[in-house]
Amino acid sequence: MSLQDGGSGVALWRQVADGIERGIADGRFAAGEKLPAEIEIAETYRVNRHTVRRALAALAERGLVRAERGSGTYVEAPRLAYPLRSRTRFSEIVGAGGREPRGQMIDASEETASRELARELGLKAGAPLIRIEALRFADRSPICVGTHWLSAERFPDAGRVYAAARSMTKLLAHYGVRDYRRASTRITAGIVDATDATRLDLALGRPILIVDSTDVDAEGRPLITKHVRFSAERVQFLVENS
């Protein structure tokens, strides 16, 4: 396939990007599939690798592909339909969409409760907390990064438990909490910062959806309060009335 820059009036990189996008649309490149290497694409379209890199960068900005350092470029899956309901479980939502959920702990530390965190968790200001930073994936795609706070007295050593379980539901079950529900949810929009851009594999300046929520047990006692940042390009929230 040979591209022409002059007659069409469309830059070569744009023609390459359009060709790859058509391949995604017609199923030649399936969601989650690794694209051919840059040199193969360059040979296919008879362009140089700089042109290919520009085309891939444009597709990445639109959320159609994602580059993994040292691995290659992958086709992004369609946006994950993410219901927000009284019983919200990341693993169940991702699994229901036919994708594999995975969690990864970034860090766990101890801190004292600010007035706001104490109010959310039903504790006194200054009470000891465990803070867990975790990244969650659907297949290979990072979906969200979250900060979670729990009472250190009720959930001692929660960081170690999460590192092994890689699931908040399993963490709570470890401490005897078999079921829980969402007590409050607040959604705002934002722009990804440098740290989360790296974690979520996003370009600086890309939009994120921020969900602040608190979960409670069957008796209504607060368990966890969270500040979760979702890639706006990879999820669509569904607010369900129940």
Image (cartoon, grey):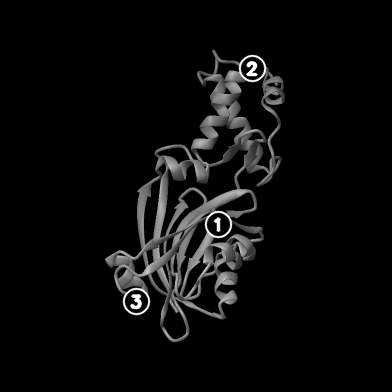
Where, quadrant-wise, is the N terminus in this rendering?
A: top right
Circle 1: residue type: Leu
Disc 2: CA contacts within 10 A as few (<14), some (14-19) or many (>=20): some
Is 121 left or right of 230, judged from the image as shown?
left
Select label 2 or label 3 by which is in front. 3
**Residue name at image x 45 percent, y 70 percent:** 152
Image: 101 above or below 21 = below
Q: Which residue is mark 2?
A: 47
The Cα atoms of the two marked residues, 2 and 3, are separated by 62 Å
Select label 1 or label 2 by which is in front. 1
State the SS at label 3. loop
Q: Which mark is residue 170?
A: none
x and y, in percent, of residue 213 in the image: 40, 67
Where, quadrant-wise, is the C terminus in this rendering?
A: bottom left
x and y, in percent, of residue 146 in the image: 47, 57
- Locate residue 182: give its quadrant: bottom left
The Cα atoms of the two marked residues, 1 and 3, are separated by 33 Å
Q: Nearer the N terminus, badge 2 or badge 3?
A: 2
Q: Which residue is mark 1?
A: 80
State the SS at label 1. strand
x and y, in percent, of residue 48 in the image: 63, 16
**Residue name at image x 45 percent, y 45 percent:** 196
The Cα atoms of the two marked residues, 1 and 2, are separated by 34 Å
**Residue name at image x 66 percent, y 37 percent:** 23
